[in-house]
Image (tube, rainbow, N blue to C red):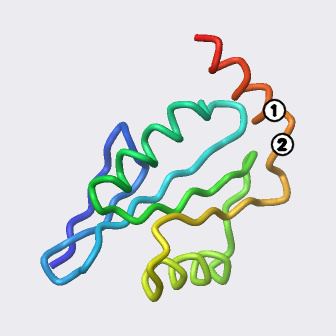
Amino acid sequence: MVKLLITKEIEVGLGGSNIKHYHALGYDGWYWHNPKDDRRKDEYLKSKGWKVLRIRSGHKIPTIEQLEIAIKKLTTTDKVFTTITLDDWKEEEYEFSLSRSDRK
């Protein structure tokens, strides 16, 4: 049996008694996301044994192939974090948000 968790902290979490690790999926839209909070969440989840996939995008969603590659990295290796960055991700907005969130 697999549990599906929807929380304020992550968009989707998967886990269950027959799964070695819990898996978290975070989706960052550049306009709304807070880099400092995302890093805090990622570190907390990793410290609790979760593997984290973070998707960075403006409005797009990843293809099935992109998801399969990222999920395979997490499920077949010791890797505990991976990112899919789509072509509409605005890195300069992310950096601005990061510098702004560090001042709080």
Q: Which mark is residue 80?
A: none
Q: Is residue 11 left or right of residue 100?
A: left
Quarter of the picture containing the C terminus is top right
Q: Are marks 1 and 2 in contact (CB under 8 Å)?
A: yes
Image position, residue 87 (x, y; %): 85, 58
Q: In the image, what residue occupies the spot 37% across and 40% down? A: 9
Residue on which the image places disc 2: 90
Q: Is residue 30 above or below residue 84?
A: above
Residue on which the image places disc 1: 93
| Nearer to me, 48 or 85 | 48
Q: Is residue 5 left or right of residue 89?
A: left
Residue found farthest to the bottom: 76
Quarter of the picture containing the N terminus is bottom left
What amino acid is at disc 2? Lys
Image position, residue 62 (x, y; %): 67, 67
Q: Is residue 41 left or right of residue 3?
A: right
What amino acid is at disc 1? Glu
* Picture quadrant where residue 17 is located: bottom left
